[in-house]
Each structure stands twice: as C-alpha cells, then as structure tokens.
Image (cartoon, rainbow, N blue to C red):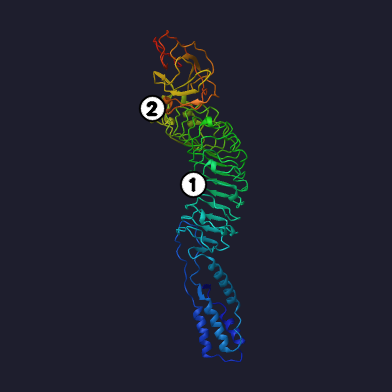
Amino acid sequence: MLGHLGPPQGRGSSRQSRASSCPRKPRSTTRSSCHAHVRRVLGPQTASEDPDPHPGAPKSPPPRPPNASVVPLPLLAEAFTLAARRGGGSPPPLPSPLLTFVTAVTLVTVTAAACPAVCRCAGGRVYCNDRGLTAVPEGLPAGATTLFLQNNRIGDAGIPARLGHLSALKVLYLYANALEQLPAYLPPALRELHLQENNVRGLCRRALARAPLLERLHLDDNSVSAAGIEEDAFAENRRLRLLFLSRNHLSSVPPGLPPALEELRLDDNRIHTIPLRAFEGLPALRRLVLDGNLLANQRMADDTFSRLVNLSELSLGRNALAAPPANLPRARLRRLSLAANAISHVPAGALARMRSLERLDLSDNNLTTLPRGLFDDLGSLSHLGLRNNPWFCGCNLAWLRDWLRRRAPRGLEVKGLLCQAPARLRGLAVGDLRGEMDASPPGASLRLSWLRPGGGAVTETLVRGERGEYVVTALQPRAAYRVCLSALDPPGVASPPLCAQARAGGEIAPVSPGPPPPRDAPPALPPAAAAGGAAAAAAGVVLGLRLPSVQAPPPAPPPRETRVAERPPRRQAAHSRLTPPL
C-alpha cells in the first residue's frame, strides 16, 4: 500500500537522535548504507491522480503537489528494524515527522481499503457511476457523504439493506437505472435523492419515512401515477423543500404535500382537475410549474392559487385555458406564463395589483384585443410576450399603443405585438402606428353563445366580424334556445348583451336585453368552435353591446338548424337572423 510523504524535514535532528540511541557503536559502512537505503526510499517521487473518467460528476480533490514523496510502508518498517538489529538493541524511535506520517499513512490505508475495487473514492465521494452495475457494490466506506450510482442497470433487488447503514450519506444519485419503486433502505441522514429516468410507479410512506431529513426529491421522467401515491406519503418528510415530478402519469395534484415545500414541478403530466384545497397548507411555496397538462378553467376552483401568498413564479403554459385563472396571487408574483393556451379574452381586472410582476407571457393564444388599462398596475414589468396572436389593430388597441409610448415601465421589452388585421396593417408593430388605429374596424369580433333552457349545456364561440352568417348545427329539432350575441371590448360604456329566444325550425321570439346564459352551467365545445380554435371557456363573460333591432321572419317549414347572422336580416324563411352591434 502506498502512502504520501512530503519533502524530508529535520535531517540533522534525525541523525542526532539515531546516534544518541547507539552511542557505543562507531558508524559503519553497513549502517551508512542502511541510511542511504532509507534515503533512497524517502527520495522524491512524482504521483498524480488518475484522470477523472466521469467529467459530468462533481470533481475530486486536486492532485497532491509534485514534490510529494511515496514510500512503501512495509519497506520503511523493515529498514528501521534492520538498522536496529545491526546496531544492537531495540528499533530506534521514529522522529516526530515520520511518526505523524506513519499515522496518516495508516488512516489513508484503511480508507483506501474500504473503497470497492469497481469504484473510485475521493474526499467522502464514491464514484460508482457508468459501470454497468446491477447492484450496489459491497465495501462502501462508512464515511461516504455522496454516492454516485447513476447510469447503471440497478433494479429494486440490487438495493441492499446495508445502504441504509451509511449514516453519513447525504446525497445519493440513482438516476438512469431500472428501479420500479423507491429504494426501501434509504440512509437516515439523506438530504438529496436523484431518481430521474427510472420506472418508479408510486410513492409510499414507509420508504420515505426512512429519510426524515430529505430536502430534495427528483422523480422526473418516471411512471408515477396519482393512484400510486399514498395519501400520507410525505407525512414524515417535513423538511422537503423541492419536489420534481415532471413527465410522469399524474392526473391530479399529489395529496398531502409537505408544508416546507418551496418548489413544485408537475409539468408534462395528465392533470386535468385541480380540486378546491389542492394547494392548501403550502405557505412557503414560491415556484409552481404546471405546463403541458390538460387544465381548463371550468375544472379549476376559483381560489386554486389565491392561498399561495408567497408564490413568485406560476407557469401554466401549454394547457387548455380560455382565460387567465381567477384570483391569481398578487402580492409577490414575479413571473406568470400563460403561453400556448386557447385564451381568447382577458378580464379587465385579471392583472390588477400585481405590482411585483416582472415577466408576463401571453404568446400563442387567440387574443385579438386586450381590455383598456390591463397593465396599469404593472410598474415592475420588464418582459411582455405577445407573440402569435391574431391582433386586430383598430381603435380597440389604441389605448395599448398610447400606454407603450407614454406610461409603460422604462426598459420594458415587448415581443410579438404585431398586427394581423386589417390587411393594410398586417405585420406592423402596434407601437409604431399613428392614426391608422383611430377608426373603428367594420365588423369587430363577436361572442356567440346559445343554451337550451331547462337542459343541455352552454355553447360559446367567437365569430369574426367579416363573416356574414354563422350556422348553428346539432340542435334538437323544434327545441327552444336562448341565443346571446355580444361585441368584444367595444369603446364606450358597456351595455347588456343582445339575447333572444329562438326555436330550431320555428319563429324567433321578441328580442329582450338581459344577461347571457348562466355561468354555472358547464360549457360544451361545438365542432365549429373547436375547428376554429377560438372557443371561450364559460358563458356570460362579456363586456358590453349596443342593442340593435331584430326582425322576425314569417313562419316556415321547420328546419334542423338555426342560422345566426351579423348583418341586417333579409326576409327569408327557414332560419332566424340577428343583427350585429352597430
């Protein structure tokens, strides 16, 4: 076994000590050769650490200095014993520098002997990764603090009980293996556990309870399902601060999340419903990522996020939202992503009092306009993403142009606010327009909804102002329907929407201003709306409409459809028509 020795020190005192131990014997050639042999053994040798074969893993301590010496410990002992025998008497006492050296070599020898032959050990870290192992190797040093076992073929049967005896182990890397469940024998002092890219299917309390000090749990890219998570799985992990469950098979938010949780990633799952108290009892949560799920407005409680008072980042991209969720946290929210949804309208007060918001992303939606004053409270805004929306640059967006010029925060970066209609302004940035937006566009977008009173669901869609009429199909023959028509964010004071009673195949009832269909009725998405990609989430979210007059056509043979038009009606049988706002 090799040990490390620095440059020879105290040669004079060493000689004097040896001479005094043998005062009656003259110095002989044999003894001098013995000393010469020891000096040769202690001569300077160069040793360097093997290059790290795993550059992705944390680096081992730096190599020893070039002036370090290497001495075989058995040879050193033999040299001193030989010198004592030839000089007569017991072996001479070791000088203090050599005694310290021998002690250090002994400790190094014991530690080195505890490292498995297939691994590499350095400074409390044990590197057993990328070895093709099917089980945790034997002989792991008891003082190991970090164990690298990633990129092997270790299965559930390859996790031995002795792993739980590593009382000093704090970080365990087991990602990219063949595990199907949490390791049953986790070390008690474990703080960080990496299990990404396995096939873990569930989380049980018994396994997690063996690591009560756990702070970070990485379970990305596994097969964890909602049914596989025990309700009290995290009951013993009161210190858990980070939980990553991205790219699994979850259909709902895991229950019983620990109160110390600060970051929760649930992106790219199959979550379609968030119940009323899913995030209750998480006062420390600061980052919540729910991108790439199946979330829709009607499947989330109104106060889903309102209890997260310390939330600073909320990401809801790539879902099926038709509007921003209600009652978003406002006090400390700094980043909000609603990109790649089906958002077609934003309520006027959706972003009120979000004075700490720095980044807002509304890209890749179905927005044609925004309500006046939407950004008035966003004094800290630095990035605004509005790409890939069908913006209609008329008087409805003139306020946004003026806000960008005069009232927007200094240094605000706006991306993607380009006109898509009318054709003469297509491709132009809204902030660069002057008087081109002052005229109201003919035929602004309209919101159309219909409901069969006493049964059925509210159906709602957007209709472009350029369309002459809209055919409503798949209606129940001879059934009565309540049809409402409203304009999107018209200038001026909001008025009640236009609503009328119509019967499939019958006459249209007199028009009466009133509220649209009730909000509590669950919406259904018609094929026409789905094809156009512009369906709203809930009926009754309107901003105003000026009432026109409606003419009722004479009776006609009952058809199987009701046709709604945005132009003044012509006298024609077989369907009903509504006139648009002026």
CA separation in Å, label 1 and label 2: 49 Å
Q: Nearer the viewer, residue 200 or 116?
A: 200
Q: Amino acid at mark 1?
A: Asn
Task: Give the mark nearest the N terminus, 1 or 2.
Answer: 1
Give the secondary structure at mark 1.
Answer: loop
Give the secondary structure at mark 2.
Answer: helix
The quarter of the picture where residue 351 lies is: top right
Considering every residue shown, the one lying at the far left of the view is 424
Q: Is residue 347 above or below residue 9?
A: above
Q: Is residue 32 above or below residue 442?
A: below
Considering every residue shown, the one lying at the far top of the view is 554
Which quadrant, please, contains the C terminus?
top left
Q: Amino acid at mark 2?
A: Leu
Question: Residue 248 appears at what percent x and percent y?
Answer: 49, 43
- Which label lies toward us, 1 or 2? 1
Q: Is residue 264 above or below residue 84?
A: above
Residue 159 visible in this rendered orientation of the protein = yes
Residue 135 - label = none
Crowding near the residue tagged with mark 1, few <14, some 14–19, many ≥20 C-alpha atoms within 10 Å: many
Residue 442 visible in this rendered orientation of the protein = no
Crowding near the residue tagged with mark 2, few <14, some 14–19, many ≥20 C-alpha atoms within 10 Å: some
Q: Nearer the viewer, residue 89 or 415?
A: 89
Question: Residue 165 appears at what percent x and percent y?
Answer: 59, 59
Residue to which mark 2 is pinned: 425
Residue at image coords 55%, 49%:
217
Question: Residue 534 appears at what percent x and percent y?
Answer: 44, 27
Q: Nearer the viewer, residue 164 or 91?
A: 164
Q: Is residue 473 above or below residue 571?
A: below
Question: Residue 159 appears at what percent x and percent y?
Answer: 53, 56
Residue to which mark 1 is pinned: 222
